[in-house]
Image (cartoon, rainbow, N blue to C red):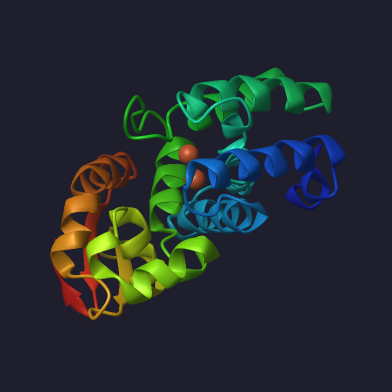
Amino acid sequence: MDPIITVKELKNDPEIQALLRVTEVELEALGYTEHSNRHASIVSKWAGEVLAKLGGSEHEVYLAGIAGYLHDIGNAVNRHDHAQSGALLAYQLLVKRGMCFEDAAEIMLAIGNHDEQLGDAVSRITAALILADKADVHKSRVRKSKIRMIKTVDAEIKDIHDRVNFAAESSHLDVDPEKRRITLDITVDLSICSVMDYFEIYFSRMSFCRKAADLLGCTFSLKINNVVLL
Ligand SMILES: [Fe+2]
Ligand SMILES: [Fe+2]
């Protein structure tokens, strides 16, 4: 059965795009990293891939893809509790576009639980979304206005998130279905930030990722510059 609505359609949907645009306005004003169409698309793709590689059904992969694309739209309301506001927004938007209540509710649950402060890995789709979201670390996510500061005045680098993102040359999730292991593999420029910076930032994120991997019947591993740290 063809899906009722696709990620491609969401990318051409003026209402969804308005929410993503306002999300970027808010997060740029607050000095947060990029949360645009790029982040939404990557999380959508990776969330689906995690479940596909672990033998998830086509339908489950589809739901993870939609949840991934919409997961941060709650920022259009407010950064605080954006997971909860985004979950409610997504449910209404999807039901309005013809999605059945059960599928829209699954997506609402995943989005409402994707943030480590109030969320938890409560379903397979939630777990895949958490892993995909936390894996998107890349220098292109740092605001241009902050790059000069990062490159030049070490003492002024206030935001460790920017430093960690700016040092990240690449990151991806490596899913090994045989060994039931999910590895976040990051390549970083250690002249910009130390491995300790990653630990500081990723300590709470990693336990969240571990719970997510656990729900999927896998262990979680963190690899930085080809060294397995967790
Ligand atoms: Fe988020
Ligand atoms: Fe996100």
Q: Nearer the viewer, residue 93 or 72?
A: 72
- Badge count: 0
Residue pictured at 37% horizontal, 59% vertical:
162
Q: Position of residue 220 (x, y in %)?
A: 24, 55
Residue pictured at 57% horizontal, 59% vertical:
42
Q: Position of residue 173 (x, y in %)?
A: 39, 64
Question: In the figure, 59 relative to 194: above or below?
Answer: above
| Left or right relative to 44: residue 120 | left
| Left or right relative to 153: residue 170 | right
| Left or right relative to 179: residue 13 | right
Q: Position of residue 141 (x, y in %)?
A: 50, 61
Q: Nearer the viewer, residue 24 or 10?
A: 24
Residue pictured at 56% horizontal, 49% vertical:
35
| Left or right relative to 100: residue 35 | left
Residue pictured at 46% horizontal, 23% vertical:
81
Quadrant location, the C terminus: bottom left
Q: Position of residue 167 (x, y in %)?
A: 34, 72
Question: In the figure, 22 relative to 96: above or below?
Answer: below
Q: Nearer the viewer, residue 120 or 84?
A: 84
Quadrant location, the N terminus: top right
Question: In the figure, 38 relative to 211: above or below?
Answer: below
Is residue 164 among the parts visible in the rendering? yes
